[in-house]
Amino acid sequence: MKAKKSLGQNFLVDQNIVARIVNSVSAKQDEFVLEIGPGHGAITKNLMEKAGWVIAVEIDESLVAELESNFPNSNLSIISSDILDLNIIQLVNEQSKLHPQLKNKIRVVANLPYYISTAILSRLIQARSVIKDMTLMLQKEVAERIASPAGNKDYGVLSVIAQTYCQTKILFDVKAGCFRPIPKVESSILRLEVYEEPVIKIVDDNLLVKIVNGAFSQRRKTILNSLKASCNTIDPKLFPQDIIAILDLANIAPERRAETLSCQEFAKLTEVFFQKLTQAL
Ligand code: SAM
């Protein structure tokens, strides 16, 4: 079967890498694993040997049919769908009802289709209340951006959002030659462990996303100027002249640049914006 480039199909063919991924997850018999994009089942098969139950979501119907015939009557639910069309929390709750003996927080494992990897990551972060951790194959630069600390040139929107809710760590790199067809980019395995108790309290998740996007919309500008320029997209009730007071209340110097702000500072900024928008200021 020919790989579909449009679906990001670069199949993992190196068994050592498959083993390293599955061993790093170390799923238990009382745990669920959600695999996004199982493909021909290279990782799935090994996950099924360790986990209590594997839920695999695949968009390509021909691959779904292949998996169904290769793994009949097993501890695998194959869901034929675009992952972006699924409500992950609902899916996990439904599966938990069917398998009440298993823990209700899932482990996520995926060699992600790179064309939508950041959209999938956002959905997973939104569904974090039912997720213990995620082990994701990503384009190397994307993994580095997500795990990058404040002050680094790679630190940006993805880093702030991911690190606010999860502990992030790059586990290892994977060479392009480990896939077929061979992709043009190098890859890395990233682990995101969802904080059980939030380390950073966010008053409004959607507002945080808008503020962080606004702050990084013009990286070369100061935080004051980039937030002034984007205040209307953060909330139409805001005016550019509100920003200086908001930064002052959040204790953030207006001449700083977005990439120097820690996740805690973005959380504080969100709190002050929230108070302003709810007229408490
Ligand atoms: N897990 C397999 C492996 O490691 O060999 C395949 C990985 S391949 C990089 C990505 C897989 O995601 C493909 O099987 C592709 O069909 C599937 N896929 C692409 N877009 C998807 C989507 N929106 N929802 C679910 N699966 C998707």
Image (tube, helix red, strand yellow):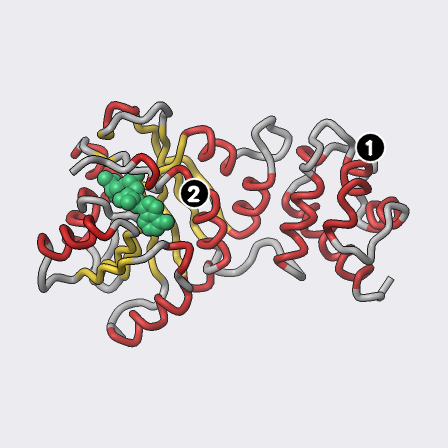
In the rendered structure, the answer to whether residue 270 lies left or right of residue 161 reads right
Looking at the image, residue 123 lies above or below residue 175: below
Q: Check disc 2 and report the residue beneath it.
A: 116
Q: Where is residue 233 drawn, in percent x and y?
A: 73, 49
Q: Where is residue 16 drawn, in percent x and y?
A: 18, 32
Q: Residue at x 26, y 60 (%)?
A: 79
In the rendered structure, the answer to whether residue 280 lies left or right of residue 260 reads right
Which quadrant holds the N terminus?
top left
Q: Which image quarter: residue 150?
A: top right
Q: Which image quarter: residue 73?
A: bottom left
Which quadrant holds the C terminus?
bottom right
**Amino acid of disc 1:** Glu
Mark 1, secondary structure of its residue: loop
Ligand 1's quadrant is top left
Q: Where is residue 253 drawn, in percent x and y?
A: 82, 38
Q: Check disc 1 and report the residue beneath it.
A: 255
Foreground of the two, 168 or 3? 3
**Amino acid of disc 2:** Ile
Looking at the image, residue 52 lies above or below residue 122: below
Q: Residue at x 50, y 58 (%)?
A: 126
